[in-house]
Image (cartoon, rainbow, N blue to C red):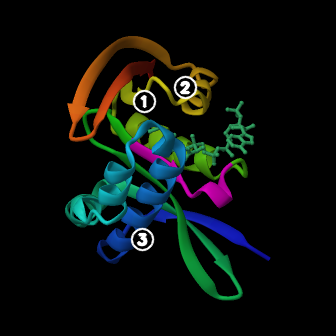
Amino acid sequence: MTTVEIRPASADDSEQIAHVVRESWLATNRNLLPADTVKRLEHSTDMSQFAAENWQNIWVAEARANDVAEIVGVVGMNPTGVIWMLYVLPGFQGCGVGSGLYDVAIGTLKRSGQRKAMLEVLAANENALAFYRSRGWVPEGRRTEHIPGFRFTAVRMGLALA
Ligand SMILES: CC(C)(COP(=O)(O)OP(=O)(O)OC[C@H]1O[C@@H](n2cnc3c(N)ncnc32)[C@H](O)[C@@H]1OP(=O)(O)O)[C@@H](O)C(=O)NCCC(=O)NCCS
């Protein structure tokens, strides 16, 4: 039997957090990218360095089966109310893991006195847009940006917490 526990991240989790972000992000956005950019991202270590510096603001969903534990979902937020990542491994999507992490993020922001939550999601990511819309988030603007090999439009969304 597989059980899933949601817990605060620890400093030791950064490699696994980076793995979840990379696999989930690429599974969703691979089709938007040229092959050489996909290859570069597959081997990038930027996210594990970032997670190692920011683990205090990250929660993880850890699946356990036969005493083997694996991080399968991650959420990151900061004290200003921004949810800056929410990713679930493709094989664990659609099972409630994302909703569980999301609820923890919103609860944490509310307890810290935030009156508004904010995030950005790629305009092409219809699943994620639907996920947030069904939870009351409202689009507030768009921005287009270039990273090497990738031009993207992001939708800024907001949610009143008070
Ligand atoms: C968006 C995401 C975090 C949702 O996590 P999840 O664990 O799949 O979500 P849940 O199982 O809690 O279900 C969320 C909703 O999707 C629906 N759903 C059902 N099966 C699904 C499936 N196979 N894939 C995606 N969503 C599914 C659920 O019914 C639920 O509907 P609701 O919003 O009306 O409640 C996850 O799909 C993901 O990591 N996507 C890729 C990365 C991403 O887009 N991140 C967000 C932008 S930064």
Classify residue 160 as left or right of residue 11. Answer: right
Residue name at image x 40 percent, y 41 percent: 33
Question: Dots 1 and 2: beta carbons under 8 Å?
Answer: yes
Residue name at image x 45 percent, y 20 percent: 159
Give, as a single range, the part of the protein colored magenta.
85-93
Q: Earlier in the sequence, mark 1 or mark 3?
A: 3
Q: Which element is circle 3 on? A: helix
Q: Residue 27, relative to residue 50: is it above or below?
A: above
Name the amino acid, label 1: Val
Q: Position of residue 61 (x, y in %)?
A: 54, 62
Q: Which element is circle 2 on? A: helix
Q: Position of residue 112 (x, y in %)?
A: 33, 39
Crowding at label 2, few (<14), some or many (≥20) Cα neighbours within 10 Å? Answer: some
Please name the residue that numbered disc 1 is placed on.
Answer: 121
Q: Residue furthest right?
A: 1
Residue 109, by quadrant, is top left
Q: Earlier in the sequence, mark 1 or mark 2?
A: 1
Please name the residue that numbered disc 2 is placed on.
Answer: 129
Q: CA distance from mark 1 to mark 3?
A: 22 Å
State yes or no: Cβ of the residue under disc 3 lies below 8 Å from any atom of ligand 1: no
- Label ID, residue 16: 3
Image quarter hosting the N terminus: bottom right
Q: Residue 83, relative to residue 19: is it above or below?
A: above
